[in-house]
Image (cartoon, grey):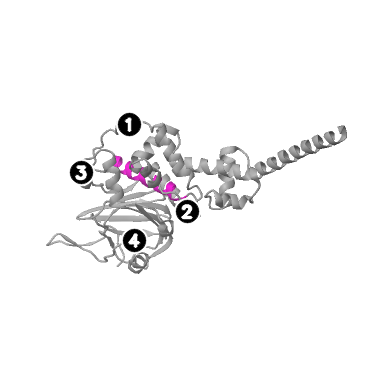
């Protein structure tokens, strides 16, 4: 079937007032093989977040061609679709309501869970990012904001909207997928929580109450968190670990930690890794690449980028400075020894 001018994306039974769904497809979010078996052949998966082991969010990047028939997409979790490349004439039908728009890169659709829609599009092959938000993550963020019954909060559907923050979060997550997760889970999971909070404020039935009266972490809490981070700098650190160490939920911890330190948790982890790398470089016991892995960076280039950003110089400059200092100390020692030997 080819969509003609003015035709709805679904055939409607006028007598019964019901839509005939021409193609049923389900997009599961956990089982990779099942996912690949059920997506239609118009989709080509380019990136997938399964190897990153992110909690609360699943990300897919697809290239897709226009379908021959309308596509029905039921879901069991809230989803966000960000248009990345290409231009399409997009139509969406939910029940008897039909919407149509020309979708360009940056266009966003929000699909609430259990509220399925039927889509049809024409145009050039396009690339999109699909973000699936686990119900447990959404409920947790709502509960931490003060809702008595977070299970009753629902997202509201949005079609081809523009939102700078959602777009930037989406592009940041795409960058993480492309890099193989170079910034670590704490970065992606922080973005996921910011995204959920923004969606709750932008398009949901939630009525968020003010946060709790505690506005900063105590010095003891900060000390415990620092120890929890420093002890695992060479590992991937999920956000829940430092939060659990002081008995807080992740969202509440992230908010108070930034208010107390001026840094988001992932920024603090990066700063700690750079500082430890500097200490190891001064010892000259490992190569720069070995130091990078020893402090939790994915590779030497990752270390170089953050090291220069925070300290203003590359790691090699610190290593060179260390050698110069050691040579000066050796010359002083040799001079002292010569003078003692001569005087005796």
Image depth: mark 1 or mark 2 in front: 1
Quarter containing the N terminus = bottom left
Secondary structure found at label 3: loop
Pick whichever of labels 1 and 3 is earlier in the sequence: 3
Pointer 4 residue: 30
Q: Position of residue 79 (x, y in %)?
A: 31, 53
Mark 3 and mark 2 in contact (Cβ < 8 Å)?
no
Distance from Cα at disc 2 to Cα at disc 3: 34 Å
The local secondary structure at tag 4 comes to loop
**Residue 181, label in figure:** 2
Q: Classify residue 335 by image quadrant.
A: top right
Q: Residue at x 30, y 65 (%)?
A: 69
Q: Which residue is label 1 attached to? A: 214
Quadrant housing residue 61: bottom left
Q: Residues within 10 Å of mark 3 (few under 14, many from 20)?
A: few
Mark closest to the chain's N terminus, 1 or 4:
4
Give the residue at x 31% y 61%.
28
Structural distance between the alpha carbons of marks 4 and 2: 18 Å
């Amino acid at each position: 079937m080819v969509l003609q001018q003015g035709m709805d994306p679904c055939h409607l039974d006028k007598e019964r007032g019901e839509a005939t769904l021409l193609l049923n497809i389900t997009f599961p979010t956990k089982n990779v093989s099942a996912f690949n078996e059920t997506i239609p052949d118009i989709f080509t998966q380019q990136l997938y977040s399964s190897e990153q082991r992110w909690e609360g969010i699943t990300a897919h990047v697809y290239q897709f061609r226009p379908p021959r028939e309308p596509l029905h997409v039921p879901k069991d979790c809230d989803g966000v679709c960000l248009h990345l490349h290409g231009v399409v004439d997009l139509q969406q039908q939910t029940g008897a309501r039909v919407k149509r728009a020309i979708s360009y890169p940056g266009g966003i659709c929000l699909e609430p869970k259990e509220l399925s829609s039927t889509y049809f599009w024409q145009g050039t092959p396009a690339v999109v990012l699909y973000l699936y938000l686990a119900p447990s993550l959404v409920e947790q963020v709502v509960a931490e904001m003060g809702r008595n019954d977070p299970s009753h909060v629902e997202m509201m559907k949005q079609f081809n909207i523009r939102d700078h923050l959602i777009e930037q979060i989406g592009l940041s997550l795409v960058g993480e997928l492309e890099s193989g997760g170079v910034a670590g889970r704490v970065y992606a999971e922080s973005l996921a929580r910011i995204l959920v909070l923004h969606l709750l404020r932008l398009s949901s039935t939630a009525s968020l109450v003010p946060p709790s009266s505690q506005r900063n972490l105590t010095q003891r809490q900060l000390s415990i968190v620092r120890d929890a981070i420093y002890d695992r700098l060479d590992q991937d650190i999920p956000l829940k670990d430092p939060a659990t160490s002081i008995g807080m939920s992740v969202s509440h911890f992230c908010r108070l930690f930034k208010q107390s330190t001026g840094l988001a948790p992932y920024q603090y982890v990066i700063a700690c890794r750079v500082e430890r790398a500097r200490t190891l470089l001064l010892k000259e016991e490992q190569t720069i690449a070995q130091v990078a892995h020893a402090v939790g960076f994915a590779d030497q280039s990752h270390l170089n980028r953050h090291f220069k950003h925070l300290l203003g110089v590359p790691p090699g400059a610190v290593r060179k400075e260390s050698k110069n200092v050691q040579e000066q100390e050796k010359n002083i020692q040799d001079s002292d020894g010569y003078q003692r030997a001569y005087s005796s």
